[in-house]
Amino acid sequence: MRARSKTLTGQELEIMKIVWERRAATVRDVYEALRTRRKVAYTTVMTMMQILEHKGYLSRKQVERAYVYRPAQPQKRVIRAMVRDFVDRVFNGSAEPLLVHLIEDRRLTPDEIEEIRRLIGGR
């Protein structure tokens, strides 16, 4: 059996963000939310949510005629694992080049840089 990937695909992450925000959602709920952003098939959403359940990111419970999905893992934990995986794959495990890149690319505001300094100083 293949090991569960730490990193969600773009579509999976988009679905998880909706479920995390709502705390519980049916396939129809997620489908309607996604439809406001882009064209998507109901069956695609259903399949993706079943995959997320199989991967351990969602749990489901039948309520009347529909399944209600809930996050099986906290958002913070999933994002932390995704960032760790990204840093490992792209920067050989070192976060420093990532921070340098973000600062040089002006992706961090002065307030964000100050917050990073504060966090580093608190260690």
Image (cartoon, grey):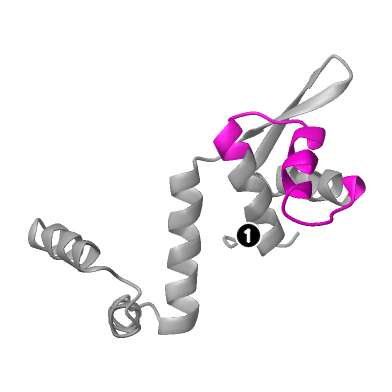
Up-down relation of residue 14 to residue 68 (above or below): below
Confirm whether residue 9 shows in the render.
Answer: no
Q: Residue at x 49, y 68 (%)?
A: 85
Q: Position of residue 107 (x, y in %)?
A: 35, 74
The residue drawn where x is 75% and y is 34% is: 29
Q: Nearer the viewer, residue 39 or 18?
A: 39
**Circle 1 SS class:** loop
Between 4 and 15, the one nearer to me in the picture:
15
Q: Quadrant of residue 66?
A: top right
Q: Can you tell which quarter of the image residue 84 is in? A: bottom left
Q: Main secondary structure of the magenta part?
A: helix
Most foreground residue, 2 or 91? 91
Check disc 1 and report the residue beneath it: 8
Region of the chain picked out in magenta, as a range? 19-43
Q: Left of 31 or right of it: where is 94?
A: left
Crowding around mark 1 (Cα neighbors within 10 Å: few <14, some 14 to 19, many 20+) is some
User: Which amino acid type corresponds to the residue marked 1 in the rendered image?
Assistant: Leu
Q: Is residue 30 magenta?
A: yes
Whole-percent x and y of residue 56? 66, 44
Tell whether 46 sits left or right of 101: right
Q: Position of residue 39 (x, y in %)?
A: 84, 56
Q: Indicate left or right for 12 with 112 as reference.
A: right
Q: Quadrant of the N terminus?
A: bottom right
